[in-house]
Amino acid sequence: MKVWIFVEGKSDVQALSALWGGWKQQLRKNDWDIKPIPLANKSNYFKKIGSRATEKLANDARDLVVGLPDLYPNRDYANTEYKHNNLQELQGVQTHLVKQHLQQMGRRTDIGSHITRFYASALKHDLEVLLLAATSQLQSRLKMSNRPSGWRRPPEEQNQDRPPKRIIEALFQRELKRSYRENTDSNAILRDADLREVAEQCPAFRAMIDWIGEKTGVRGY
C-alpha cells in the first residue's frame, strides 16, 4: 500500500523525504510506503494531476493520493481555468481536475469511493516555509547564536511579496556570506527537524499529515 504525493519539483521530493524519514520507517513497519512524485513545475502540475492521480487511485483500491503543489505564486493563473486566490480555491481546483479525469475514464459510478482517497493540499508559498518552521535546525545551519526571526507566525501566513524562500536566501547571505543551496541546505535542515514541531507551526501542512495518519493508522508524531 502506498501514499502517492504529487509535488512540483525534485527539490520538494528530497526535502520532504528528509523531513519524514522517521515516519516513513514506521509506515513501512505497517506495510505502507510514502512516495513523493515531482511534476516539473506548477503549470505542468495542473496539466498532469488529474490523469496521474486517477491512475494511482484506479490501480489499487487501498492506495492514497495527495496533491501538494505550491500555493504561491498564483497570479499567473488569474485568467485561466486554474484560477485560485487561496488554499481553499486551490484545493477545489485540484479536486475538480481529478473528478473530471475520473469521469473521462468512465468511472462515474465509483467517483465517490475514489475521491475519498484523494487529499488536495498545498505548500503555502514554497518548500522553504517548512524551513522557517524548523527554527532550531535553521539556526544551527546558519551558525547563529540567537534564533532567527523576522517573519510571520505561522510562517504559512508570510506575505506573498516576501515569500519564505526570499527570507531564507537573505539569511544565508547575511549569516554565512553565501547563497542558499536549495537541495543540500533544505535537506540538512529538515533531516534533523522534528515533524511535530514543523507541523504545529504550519496548519495546512499539518492537516495533510493528520489525514495520512488517519487513513494509514500511522501517525506522523
Image (tube, grey):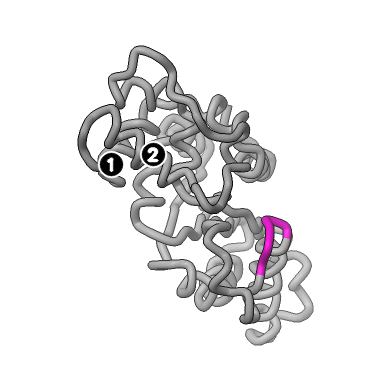
- Residue at image mark 2: 168
Residue 86 colored in magenta in the image? yes
Earlier residue among tags 1 and 2: 2
Question: Would you place residue 72 above or below residue 173 in this image?
Answer: below
Magenta-colored segment: predominant secondary structure:
loop
- Tell me which corner region of the image, top left, top right, bottom left or bottom right, holds residue 171: top left
Q: Residue furthest left?
A: 178
Task: Indicate the position of residue 50 as horizontal and vertical percent values.
Answer: 58, 74
Q: Which residue is mark 1?
A: 180
Total number of numbered discs in the rendering: 2
Q: Residue at x 60, y 31 (%)?
A: 201
Region in magenta: 84-88
**How would you rate the neighbour count of disc 2 (Cα within 10 Å): few for under 14, some for 14-19, many for 20 or more?**
many
Residue 140 occupies quadrant:
top left
Q: Would you say 53 lies left or right of 42 here?
A: right
How far, Cα to Cα, is label 1 from label 2?
7 Å
Q: Nearer the viewer, residue 183 or 103?
A: 183
Q: Tell me if residue 16 comes above or below residue 95 in the rendering.
A: above
